[in-house]
Amino acid sequence: MKLLVDESVGIKVYFKLKQMGFDVVTPIYSMKGAGDEEVMRSAVLENRVIITNDKDFGWLAHLYKPLGVILLRLKDERAENKIKIIQYVLEKYGERIPRNILIVSEKKIRIRSI
């Protein structure tokens, strides 16, 4: 599964997912400071799942129809926690990501269709 780690998630998460073997990109390098819509269009063109903390991607997903969105709503914002939770979501919910928005907290995962 191809991933796009939004700037809001952090560079440490990007590097760790890359190290784990995921096909992952981030706008931090190629599109630094790009608006949410530009990042969304890039994800759609490259058929990537967006991982973000930014709630705006929820409503943008309904307009642009990306492969999927993992929206992190975490209390513990440390990179280590994000990585652990993202890895869990990809392993346990991977087949449910396409055409859905997964709203992820430490306590639950809600799934909404795009």
Image (cartoon, rainbow, N blue to C red):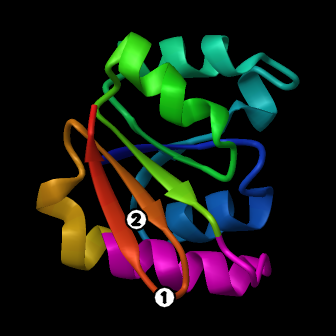
Kindly report the distance in space between the C-alpha atoms of the residues bearing marks 1 and 2. Answer: 27 Å
Mark 2, residue position = 21
Above or below, 83 relative to 98: below
Where the C terminus falls, by quadrant?
top left
Q: Is residue 81 magenta?
A: yes
Where residue 72 sits, quadrant-wise, is bottom right
Q: Secondary structure at mark 2?
A: loop
The local crowd at label 1, few if under 14, some if 14 to 19, many if 20 or more residues have their Cα within 10 Å, is few
Q: Amino acid at mark 2?
A: Gly
Q: Secondary structure at mark 1?
A: loop
Residue under the image location 62 percent in, 21 percent down: 39
Residue under the image location 79 percent in, 17 percent down: 34
Mark 1, residue position = 107
Q: Does label 1 or label 2 sit earlier along the sequence? A: 2
In the rendered image, residue 18, in percent from the top left (x then y), is placed at 53, 60
Pick the residue in front: 56 or 44: 56
Is residue 59 shown left or right of residue 30? left
Circles 1 and 2 in contact, beta carbons < 8 Å: no
Residue under the image location 22 percent in, 69 percent down: 93
Residues drawn in magenta: 74-89
